[in-house]
């Protein structure tokens, strides 16, 4: 069938901004296939996976929220933020996903059913995630022992390492250097360190201990404590 042919990782990550609800429905049709007409497709629920600030602050109406994970990705603080948690002069760092066979990334998936809510959510997310240049459609799991996903075709925003498509990508650095940058950066949405600590808290609340994130949070707290001690 057509759906089994084109549902590949390459295909699933090629949709660039801007993005509309009609494009989402077309993509869902291509990825999942359907024997029904397009009017039925428009009524399908939309699912969005959040692995950063979306975990604790969705910002749109939704019908259901599930805690779970996606496979073969890991969360990393490699994306520069010049619009939310930093400035063009001094970018902050936010999370993106990078391929990591065998690893999992925990977060939250949101179900959006009503047509007006879908339109509003897509419009909102296109602005909020405008520095994330790719979308993927992934399998979402809620049970670590399950081999079958709870939901397929869940949309997730990803900031790629391609500097031509994503000029704000910063890439890897030492824990110390990333933490220093996060402690110093601040943007229209607030201090970068607030984002780091909020994400740490949100993940701990769902039972996830992310080593990369916790190492950064601990180093940021050490830097802040050292600064306070020096100031006093």
Image (spheres, rainbow, N blue to C red):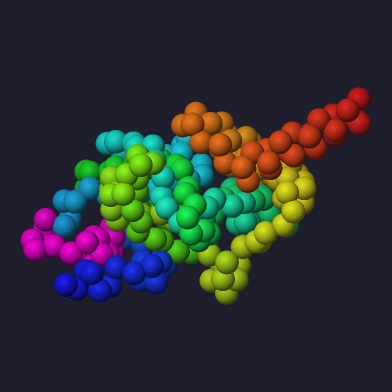
Task: Please provide percent x and percent y for residue 115.
Answer: 22, 48
Question: Quick one: which residue is furthest to the left in this view?
Answer: 36
Q: Residue at x 67, y 59 (%)?
A: 172
Task: Please provide percent x and percent y for residue 202.
Answer: 52, 33
Q: Residue at x 16, y 72 (%)?
A: 1
Q: Can residue 186 be seen in this view?
A: yes
Q: Residue at x 73, y 38 (%)?
A: 220
Question: Quick one: which residue is furthest to the top in this view?
Answer: 232
The answer to which of 135 and 118 lies nearer the viewer is 135
Q: Relative to 205, say whether 31 is above or below.
A: below
Task: Please provide percent x and percent y for residue 56.
Answer: 47, 35
Q: State the extent of the magenta-drawn residues as a range.
A: 21-40
Relative to 232, 221 lies left or right: left
Q: Relative to 174, say whether 211 is above or below.
A: above
Q: Is the magenta stretch mostly helix, strand or loop?
A: helix
Q: Which residue is drawn at 22% across and 48% down?
A: 45
Q: Does 35 appear in magenta?
A: yes
Task: Please provide percent x and percent y for residue 32.
Answer: 22, 61
Relative to 126, 4 lies left or right: left
């Amino acid at each position: 069938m057509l759906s089994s042919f084109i549902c590949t990782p390459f295909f699933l990550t090629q949709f660039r901004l801007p993005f509309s609800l009609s494009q989402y429905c077309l993509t869902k049709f291509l990825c999942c296939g359907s024997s029904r007409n397009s009017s039925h497709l428009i009524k399908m629920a939309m699912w969005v996976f959040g692995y950063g600030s979306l975990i604790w602050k969705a910002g749109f109406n939704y019908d259901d929220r599930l805690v779970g994970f996606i496979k073969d990705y890991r969360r990393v603080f490699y994306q520069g933020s010049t619009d939310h948690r930093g400035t063009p002069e001094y970018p902050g760092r936010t999370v993106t996903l990078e391929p990591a066979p065998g690893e999992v990334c925990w977060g939250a998936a949101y179900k959006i059913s009503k047509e007006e809510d879908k339109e509003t959510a897509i419009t909102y997310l296109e602005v909020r995630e405008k520095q994330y240049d790719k979308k993927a459609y992934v399998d979402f799991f809620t049970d670590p022992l399950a081999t079958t996903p709870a939901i397929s075709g869940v949309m997730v925003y990803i900031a790629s390492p391609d500097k031509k498509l994503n000029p704000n990508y910063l890439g890897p650095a030492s824990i110390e250097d990333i933490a220093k940058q996060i402690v110093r950066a601040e943007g229209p949405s607030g201090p970068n360190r607030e984002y780091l600590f909020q994400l740490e808290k949100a993940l701990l609340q769902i039972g996830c201990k992310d080593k990369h994130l916790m190492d950064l949070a601990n180093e940021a707290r050490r830097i802040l404590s050292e600064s306070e001690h020096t100031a006093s």
